[in-house]
Image (spheres, rainbow, N blue to C red):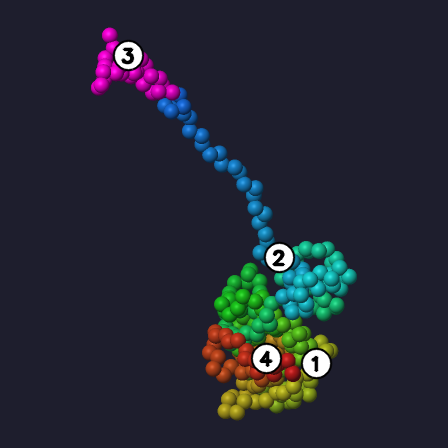
Amino acid sequence: MSRQGKGGKASSKPTNKKGGKRRDEAKRKDPVSEKAPIKKKVAVASMPKKISNSDEIRLNKYISNSGVCSRRDADMHIAVGSVTVNGKIINEMGYKVKFEDEVRFDGARINPEKKTYVLLNKPKGFATTTSDSKGKTVMDLVANATNARIKPIGRLGRGSTGLLLFTNDDIIVKKFTNSKTGVSRLFEIELDKDLKYEDFKKIQDGIKPMGKLVAVEEISYIDGAPKTTIGLKIKNTGNSILHTIFDHLKYEIIRVDCVQIGQLTKKDLPRGHWKHLTTQEVNTLQMM
């Protein structure tokens, strides 16, 4: 007999407990809801990125950074053959160059860096070179001065002291390296013995070691100092010429100190320190 619910109506709910149990078990055994496999995300290997050489720059950007023209105009000039790299005409778009390459635009060398001028009062013990294989060099002393690729103009021996100018301005470098129209440097030189007056006159008039004339601008004894110490002004950029002069006259150089370059002096510049040239000092150098 069927049960009756309230009001005497028969209940429609199933009374089979076993049937309900089977349905519950079926739900628990549902493979999707019970232990469905978890899909793992598969890592897709990304394409290796092309590593760019930080020492290289596109030629059109190099030209643009030098202030000659825009990149778009640079591409036009490259296309018509107005640009050379290390003596070779380049027509390739997207061509890359290194900062040390010689890039010329209409025959004139260009540089993408801001013109920088650093004056160092060099101490003893540092070689005047950009080579890393020479021990301590003057480049170590100016390492924090600028990120520009500056180089020393001329040389001071490892045992010599005094002023040394660094720049990336090729026009100034060319001006300095011309021994006839270049920039004068004043040296204070100490010899192993008194400089005889007749030898003083020979230097003043111009001597010819190995048959080649060596001319100096000025030579003088220094007031209040022994005659072993003299001042000598010359336009040659190296100090080996000083040894050439005094070796020829049988003197040994004990000390060399560059005390002036053009109008630049050591005033307020202690030994081992550097400074950036002022706009006025740069303008003076450019007008010389």
Residue assigned mark 3: 16
Lower position in the chain sequence, tag 3 or tag 4 = 3
* Residue 25 on the magenta span: yes
Q: Nearer the viewer, residue 233 or 226?
A: 233
**How many marks are shown on the rendered structure?**
4
The residue nearer to you, when weighing 12 against 115, is 12
- Could you say where residue 265 lies in the image, as x and y percent from the top left? 54, 83
Type of the residue with mark 1: Lys
Badge 2 or badge 1: first in the primary sequence: 2
Residue 56 shows which numbered tag? 2
Residue 110 x/y as whole percent: 67, 68
Q: Is residue 5 above or below residue 195?
A: above
Earlier-in-chain disc, 4 versus 2: 2
Q: Which residue is label 1 attached to?
A: 180
Structural distance between the alpha carbons of marks 2 and 1? 37 Å
- Three-letter code, disc 4: Val
Is residue 193 visible from the viewing direction of this image? Answer: no
Given this view, does label 3 or label 4 mark the residue nearer the observer? Answer: 3
In which quadrant of the rendered view does residue 132 lie? bottom right
Q: Earlier in the sequence, mark 3 or mark 1?
A: 3
**Up-down: is 160 above or below 43?**
below
Local secondary structure at mark 3: loop
Q: Residues within 10 Å of mark 4 (few under 14, many from 20)?
A: some
Over which residues does the magenta segment extend?
Answer: 1-30
Q: Which residue position holds label 4?
A: 282
**Could you say where residue 102 lies in the image, as x and y percent from the top left?**
68, 63
- In this rendering, the answer to whether 11 lies above or below 176 is above
Instruction: Tell me which residue sits at (67%, 65%) in the image.
Output: 70
Q: How far apart are marks 3 and 4 (CA)?
A: 107 Å
Sort mark 2 into few (<14), some (14-19) or many (20+) by Cα contacts within 10 Å. some
